[in-house]
Image (cartoon, rainbow, N blue to C red):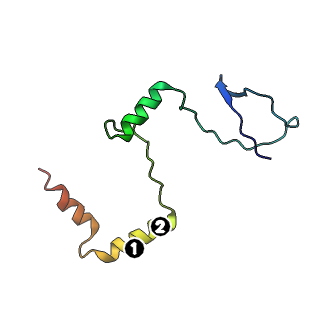
Amino acid sequence: MTEMITAIYEKGVLRPLEPLHLRERQQVRIQVVVDNASDPVEIVLAGLAQEGVLTPPQGYSDITPLSEQERQALAEQLGESQEKPLSEIIIEERGAIC
């Protein structure tokens, strides 16, 4: 059974806003989805970020991380395609540090 409910988090406890049809001590899985859609500040910030006027907060990214297999394949591809070690290329791009 899958059921979507709304809850309030207060004092370290999620409190459902409607009755749940569960047995006492029944184990469940919870997926937390923060609902910022009703927060006017969040709506404005999201709009500004979407238009490129505002930089999203640190740690925020809508980029899906690579899987371990994808990272390994990319590392191998980069290792094969460079005449110089990647570290030397990075140092050259940064310029001399004085």
Which one is in front, 59 or 63? 63
Look at the image and tell me whether residue 67 can be seen.
yes
Look at the image and tell me whether residue 12 can be seen.
no
Residue indicated by mark 1: 76
Q: Residues within 10 Å of mark 1 (few under 14, many from 20)?
A: few
Q: Report the number of discs.
A: 2
Query: In the rendered structure, are the residues bearing label 2 and label 1 in contact, judged by CB atoms less than 8 Å apart?
Result: no
Measured as percent of width and height from the top left, residue 3 is found at: 75, 41
Residue indicated by mark 2: 70
Q: Residue at x 42, y 29 (%)?
A: 44
| SS state under label 1 | helix
Q: Residue at x 21, y 60 (%)?
A: 91
Which one is in front, 53 or 26? 53
| Quarter of the image where one finds residue 80 | bottom left
Residue 56: mark? none
Measured as percent of width and height from the top left, residue 74 is found at: 40, 69
Image: 19 above or below 84: above
Amino acid type, mark 2? Glu
Among numbered discs 2 and 1, the one appearing first in the sequence: 2
Amino acid type, mark 1? Glu
| Quarter of the image where one finds residue 89 | bottom left
